[in-house]
Amino acid sequence: MNVSDARLLAAEQPSGARARQTAAYYIVFIVLGLTTASLGPTLPGLAGHLGVALSLMSSLFPIRSLGYLLGSLLSGRLYDRFPAHPIMVAMLAVMGVMMSLVPVLPFLPLLAAAFLVVGLCEGFIDVGGNTLIVWVHRDGVGPYMNALHFFFGVGAFLSPLIIAQVIALTGSFTWAYWIFSILFIPAAVWLARQPTPKSLHPHAPAQTAEKPSDTAAPRPPADPVLIAVITVFFFLYVAGEVSMGGWAYSYATALGLGDPVTSAYLTSAFWGALTFGRLLSIPIAARLRSEQILWMDLIGVGISLAAVILFPASGAALWAGVIGAGLFMASVFPTMLAFAGQRMTITGQATGLFLVGASLGGMSVPWIIGQLFEPVGPAVVMWAIAASVGLALACFGLVWLRSQTVGAWRR
């Protein structure tokens, strides 16, 4: 589908309808961010509620990630064949019910099943939001897509703040989950009232996301070596990001660098820095090449983590390091996708491998940290994140060298 076709499709709906649809996706992604960032700050409370070790409770991270992976794999065909909004509304309703049950479930297997379903719904909603906003705006989707992920960051930023206030007022995290479950209601109702946008082809998002100049410029064919190394890169990077968001709270409380409330604020500061960094990355990307941004981002994350590791007893170093890591991590994922697309033809299979790598990284490394947290000590959190980022930097170096070797360099 060419650009003129995309513009005609976008013009089929009144601008007011597109605005309401877009607002619905933004609201849904705020709720999605609230849910995604809620597990880390409440993990010790959930462990205490069930009377199980924190290492065992950390299994919730890979279980939810497994659900997300399954939801991502299953949802694409459904969105292509059936009206998308009813599917998303159903997922919102199911996730809202599961979130309301989390603080009262009496056994770990039941809690694990609930988080598996939550992850499944998250996968459906994430794929749906990213796909449908392209169907609405077509060739003009760029700023709307950036805003969609910004609003996810807003939700992730607010989640620990809400949890901290609930703990301060009630002494328990229970009402935080109930507040989140209530917020699913207006999101689902607003989305249900909007018509599902039309799509002529299931691969329309990938086609219309490219700029005209990109579609005209020749690209080398997909390089299996590049694809493999980039997949490992996404595994390592997402492992570091999810580990920081999920374990910063427990790290701070275990070392006595913060009480439950201030440690929740620390987690919120990480997500807030990540969100603010996404805003900053928009003008930066217009001035610098993607490889320059990636070098600066990955080295910046490394310096931030070094501050925390070198000064383990300093609360100031912890806050500076966590906030710095969030700022520099903000643009890594989308910039790496852009870098890969500039150097080879990105097929659907390649994109699928990248996402599988990212999902597996988010599943495995936070779980490994949970197994080592008590026997080795809280320091394992920052060392594991630093190792993931360091290896990701090495992978990017290999990708950068390989892209020049195979003649795929584009400026």
Image (tube, grey):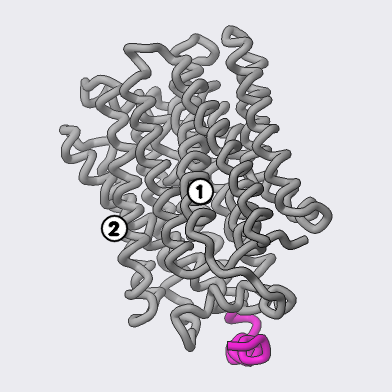
**Closest to the observer: 11 or 180?**
11
Residue at 20% x, 37% y: name it.
105
Q: Is residue 163 above or below residue 47?
A: below
The magenta-colored residue range is 1-18
Height in image: 229 above or below 84?
above
Q: Would residue 15 be found to the left or right of residue 371 on screen?
A: right
Residue 94, labelled with which disc? 2
User: Which of 256/391 is in front?
Assistant: 391
Tell me the SS state at disc 2: helix
Residue 219 in the image, given as x and y percentages of width and height? 64, 71
Residue kind at label 2, given as amino acid type? Val
Q: Which mark is residue 229?
A: 1
Expressed as whole percent of the image width and height from the top left, the position of residue 281 reads 73, 50
Question: Circle 1 — which element?
Answer: helix
Q: Say left or right for 172 vs 14.
A: left
Please say whether residue 150 is visible from this viewpoint: no
| Nearest to N terminus: mark 1 or mark 2 | 2
**Is mark 1 in CB contact (under 8 Å) with mark 2?**
no
Which residue corresponds to the image point at 25% horizontal and 43% vertical from the top-left?
Answer: 101
- Does the magenta-highlighted stretch encompass residue 386? no
